[in-house]
Amino acid sequence: MTVTVSNKAELVVPPSVQRQAGIQPGDRLEFRVNSRTITITPATYKPTKSELAAIRKGEAAIARGESVSLADFLHGVDRNRRKAGTKASRKVSR
């Protein structure tokens, strides 16, 4: 398929090309340009330093045999969320 690019319209990847390439809605793509050639590849996620530290900490805990069931984890998350907002007493207007 050939498309003429104008200065008024964005460059769009036709649906047939998206299907052939396996591009789905929500996919993150990376564009590289080299000497009049555009290469489109899936974007790879690079964790931040703090995320890498949390991953290492979790892997170390698993190696020590420390584990928490999903139900216990979700209960702990829910409990912390409930404690965060305490209800204030309502003031009655006169």
Image: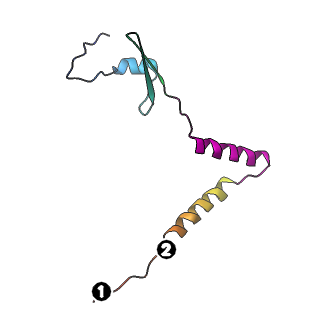
Q: Against 71, is 38 above or below?
A: above
Q: Against 11, is 50 above or below?
A: below
Rendered image: mark on residue 66: none
Residue 14 placement (x, y as % from top left): 33, 19
In this figure, which colouring scheme has been used for the structure? Answer: rainbow
Q: Which stretch did the figure color magenta?
A: 44-68
Amino acid at dot 1: Ser
Q: Residue furthest right?
A: 64
Does residue 27 appear to the left or right of 12 in the view shown? right
Q: Main secondary structure of the magenta part?
A: helix
Does residue 87 appear to the left or right of 65 in the view shown? left
Residue nearer the viewer, 5 or 72: 5
Label 1: which secondary element = loop
Does residue 18 appear to the left or right of 67 in the view shown? left
Q: Residue at x 48, y 70 (%)?
A: 85
Amino acid at dot 2: Thr
Tag 1 residue: 93
Rendered image: mark on residue 86: 2
User: For residue 47: magenta?
Assistant: yes
Q: Quadrant of the C terminus?
A: bottom left
Does residue 19 appear to the left or right of 70 in the view shown? left
User: For residue 61: magenta?
Assistant: yes
Q: Quadrant of the N terminus?
A: top left
Q: Earlier in the sequence, mark 2 or mark 1?
A: 2
Cα separation between marks 2 and 1: 21 Å
